[in-house]
Each structure stands twice: as structure tokens, then as C-alpha cells.
Image (tube, rainbow, N blue to C red):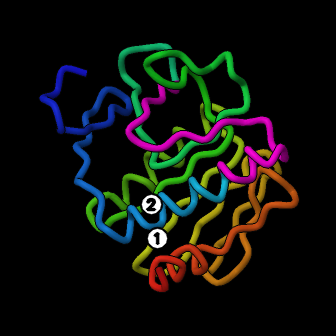
């Protein structure tokens, strides 16, 4: 919280991890995903809320854990306060960059599982793959960008390739 304006970092187990600015492709994917999820919710099919970074997540009530996932979906409105989400989001989406891949796959994955996140996606633009940790159903899978990927909502499947291509044709 005491970092200069414009500097972003996360705090996990008391260690600070500086965050690089997102790439253009990262932003395309993040905006497309948030739009798809938000449109679904606004159509009255879901009762949760979607938030995009920078939006703080205090996964534990201490001063050693503060994360800013690229996207998060929260179904319990009581977890939302003025400074962010207090407790586990229901769904977290991280879009990896070469500088933070290990952090997303190792450190954050175990933190999200431990704190009670139901669904965690790691979107990798370089490999065009999505790693899915469905903690609620004890399922782990990897999908290509052109495959329909299941979400918190049984009737909402998302193809990342459609999102990337949408911008190419805009």
C-alpha cells in the first residue's frame, strides 16, 4: 500500500513480488474475459460480481497476504469492502507473462487452493493454453485456447481464441 503511484506489487507469505505492466495481448484477453463474464451476469444468469486488476484481494486477515489477480469473481457480497475483497474469491483468473509464470503456477496456485478459491484459471498467451484448477470438484485440466472452457456457471463456456480473434477483426 505504501508503494509509489503506478507501482504494483503483491504480498504472499510476507514476500513482496513486483508486477510488470501487462502486454497488449494480456489486456485483450483480460478485457474480453471480463466482458464475457460481466455480460453473462448482467443478463441475469449469475448472481456474482466480476472485478479486474488492480483490485486487492486479502486472502488472509493478516499483513502478509495481498494479491491483485487479473480477474476475480466474488459471489458473496459481504466479502467486498472499499479496499477490495476480504477472503477467497470464488473464481480467479491470472494471465501469465514470462516474468511471472512460476509465481502464478506455484506460489499463487497453492495460496488460492489453501484459502478456498473454487476455480482458478491460469491463462498462458504464449502456449495458448489454460490450466484449470477446479478445487470444488477436485479436477485439474489443461485446455487449448480453441476449446470451450467451463466456468463457475454450467451454461457458460468460454473460448479464449474467440476473444483474441475478436480484436483481430475489430
In front of the other: 140 or 1: 1
Q: Mark 2 points at which residue?
A: 95
Q: Where is residue 19 in the image (x, y as percent from the top left)?
A: 26, 47
How packed mark 2 is, by other alpha carbons closer than 10 Å (few <14, some 14-19, many 20 or more), is many
Residue 50 highlighted magenta (yes or no): yes
Q: Position of residue 119 (x, y in %)?
A: 68, 49
Looking at the rendered structure, which numbered label has been put on residue 124?
A: 1
Task: Say left or right for 107 vs 158.
Answer: left
Label total for image = 2
Task: Say left or right for 127 vs 159.
Answer: left
In front of the other: 94 or 160: 160
Give me the residue at 70% from left, 62% from top. 140
Magenta stretch bounds = 38-59
Q: In which quarter of the image is the N terminus?
A: top left
In front of the other: 73 or 40: 40
Residue 169 highlighted magenta (yes or no): no
Give me the residue at 40% from left, 79% from top. 126
The quarter holding residue 83 reads top left
The quarter holding residue 129 reads bottom right
User: Earlier along the polypeptide chain: callout 1 or callout 2?
Assistant: 2
Q: SS class of the residue under badge 2?
A: strand
The image shows residue 148, relative to residue 103, as above or below, that is below
The image shows residue 15, relative to residue 32, as above or below, that is above
Amino acid at each position: 500500500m505504501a508503494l509509489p503511484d503506478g507501482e504494483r506489487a503483491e504480498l504472499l507469505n510476507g514476500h513482496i513480488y513486483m508486477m510488470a505492466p501487462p502486454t497488449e495481448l494480456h489486456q485483450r484477453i483480460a478485457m474480453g474475459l471480463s466482458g464475457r463474464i460481466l455480460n453473462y451476469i448482467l443478463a441475469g444468469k449469475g448472481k456474482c460480481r466480476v472485478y479486474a486488476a488492480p483490485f486487492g484481494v486479502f486472502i488472509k486477515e493478516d499483513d502478509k497476504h495481498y494479491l491483485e489477480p487479473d480477474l476475480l469473481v466474488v459471489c458473496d457480497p459481504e466479502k467486498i469492502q472499499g479496499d477490495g475483497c476480504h477472503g477467497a474469491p470464488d473464481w480467479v483468473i491470472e494471465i501469465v507473462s514470462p516474468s511471472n509464470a512460476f509465481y502464478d503456477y506455484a506460489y499463487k496456485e497453492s495460496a488460492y487452493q489453501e484459502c478456498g478459491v473454487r476455480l482458478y484459471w491460469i491463462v498462458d498467451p504464449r502456449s495458448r493454453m489454460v490450466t484449470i484448477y477446479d478445487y470444488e470438484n477436485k479436477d485439474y485440466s489443461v485446455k487449448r485456447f480453441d476449446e470451450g472452457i467451463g466456468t463457475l456457471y454450467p451454461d457458460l463456456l468460454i473460448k479464449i481464441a474467440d476473444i483474441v480473434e475478436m480484436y483481430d477483426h475489430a
